Amino acid sequence: MAIQWFPGHMHLTKKAISERIKEIDVVIELLDARLPGSSANPMLADLTSARPALKVLNKQDLADPARTALWLAYYNSLPATRAIELDASETAPARRLIQACRELAPLRGGMVKPMRVLICGIPNVGKSTLINTLTGKRATKTGDEAGITKLEQRISLADDFYLYDTPGMLWPRIIVTKSGYNLAASGAIGRNAFNEEEVALELLDYLIKDYPEALVARYKVEVPAGISDEQMLEEIGRKRGAVLTKGRINLQKAAEIVIHEFRACALGRITLETPDEFAQWLAAGQLLDAERQVKKDKIETDRLIRFKKIPRPDKPRDAG
């Protein structure tokens, strides 16, 4: 099942960014270091493409360091783009943002031409925590829940450095199926928009292949060759006491355990995608989306023909 989540306030955020970007010098996009490709909003990329970009791989303390290095190299290879890793709760690294922005827009600064920076990202990626760290006070509300910030805010980080914070925003249609599951696992999507069992199974399918040692260490289970995600979820449920009458496993409870412990880093530092993997998923998603559009166009053409809005392709036009 494809996962989608685009509440009404996100439409307002899109409109606000479209207006604000006209006077912005640098765009900071916070990404989740555990899923740097899936957490990069393609709609934001379209809205802000005319501005230099600073990609911040946030929550790097939860991610696989080797894979973080791969993603930093990838984003730093893009034009007009810089990338740094960050743990938003650390004061000193957070202040690197100001220096990085000045390097991306060296002609801005001072009271005559103050630096104007837009910070954006998906829900629950850590923007509010980062801003509170930068300002040294509780400037914004925070919480481990998607969709906390609802309004744009302007925050002065220095006399000549203005930061505009926007609510977390996903995009109307997620074409990369794997991204939907990864976003749900990370907490970027409201819990009513996905099925916990499906998300946990997708997560376990990846962990079995890429991080089997994490499952062994955390759940004291074996990960033999060929074990399925369903079998692993049942085994974890059994180990954690999520057992119903007659020995049946409470799969919902087991799924909640897996998702919660991934988010809490109880499984260790894990990254759910590499640049190469995400590129393959994106290419496949774009192909399916193009095929979907062809089918949609055909349905619309057939409708117009049926109501005689346009002629049939094989019907000759009147010579006049």
Image (spheres, rainbow, N blue to C red):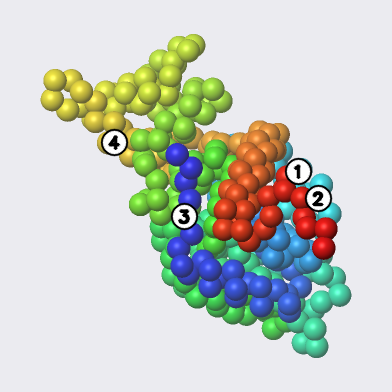
Q: Most extreme residue toward the bottom, as rendered?
A: 112
Q: Quadrant of the rendered structure where residue 290 is?
A: top right
- Circles 3 and 1, Cβ within 8 Å, touching? The answer is no
Q: Quadrant of the N terminus?
A: top left
Q: Which residue is mark 2?
A: 78
- Pointer 3 or 1: first along the chain: 3
- Circles 2 and 3, Cβ within 8 Å, touching? The answer is no
At label 2, which amino acid type do we have? Leu
Helix, strand or loop under label 2: loop
Look at the image and tell me whether residue 300 can be seen: no
Of marks 2 and 4, the one in the foreground:
4
- Pointer 2 or 4: first along the chain: 2
Helix, strand or loop under label 3: loop
Crowdedness near tag 2: few (<14), some (14–19) or many (≥20) residues, C-alpha within 10 Å: few
Distance CA(mark 4)–CA(mark 1): 37 Å
Q: Is residue 88 above or below residue 66?
A: below
Distance CA(mark 2)–CA(mark 4): 42 Å
Helix, strand or loop under label 4: helix
At label 4, which amino acid type do we have? Gln
Q: Which residue is mark 1?
A: 74
Q: Is residue 144 left or right of residue 278?
A: left
Q: Is residue 311 left or right of residue 4?
A: right
Instruction: Using the image, tell me which numbered label, if any, was put on residue 5.
Output: 3
Q: Is residue 205 left or right of residue 301?
A: left
Q: Which residue is mark 4?
A: 252
- Pointer 3 or 4: first along the chain: 3
Q: Is residue 150 above or below residue 71?
A: below
Q: Residue at x 51, y 66 (%)?
A: 10
